[in-house]
Image (cartoon, rainbow, N blue to C red):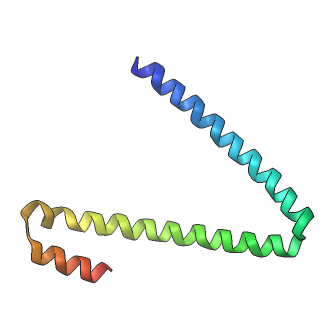
Amino acid sequence: MRTIKAINNFKVDLFITFFLIALGFYLRTIFVSKMGADLTGVMLLFTQLTAYLNLAELGIGVAAASLLYKPLSEGDYAKIKYLTLLLS
């Protein structure tokens, strides 16, 4: 039963991924025809910058969470407070 659910989950995820890729191509074509290549380029520039900043933040968030494991398990609230102030 778990295998069947996993296969169905994979199929749905694959369909959604291909749908979003096709939608991206379609929307870029619409943006270029309606707004022009210059404005579309600026929009894509900011989209890429936002994506890179999200990737950079992902690493910091994971590192901060891993730093808090030991103080949380030991109940060291002073160190938790120190780390949250340091990382915020």
Which residue, as the protein is rendered here, is positioned at the far front? 34
Where 15 falls versus 74 (above or below)?
above
Q: Point out the image quarter for the C terminus.
A: bottom left
Q: In this view, does 19 lie to the left or right of 62?
A: right
Q: In this view, does 43 lie to the left or right of 74?
A: right
Q: In this view, does 51 lie to the left or right of 20?
A: left
Query: Which residue occupies 84% across, 63% down?
Result: 31
Where 19 falls versus 33 (above or below)?
above
Residue 15 falls in image quadrant:
top right
- Numbered-mark total: 0
Query: Which residue occupies 52% across, 68% down?
Result: 54
Where 26 falls versus 68 (above or below)?
above
Residue 60 falls in image quadrant:
bottom left
Q: Point out the image quarter for the N terminus.
A: top left
Residue 46 falls in image quadrant:
bottom right
- From the top left corner, tell me how far across and down residue 58 is, in percent: 44, 65
Q: In this view, does 48 lie to the left or right of 84?
A: right
- From the top left corner, tell me how far across and down residue 70 is, in percent: 15, 63
Query: Which residue occupies 48% across, 71% down?
Result: 56
- From the top left corner, tell me how far across and down residue 72 is, in percent: 14, 63
Query: Which residue occupies 53% across, 25% down?
Result: 8
- From the top left corner, tell me how far across and down residue 68 is, in percent: 21, 67
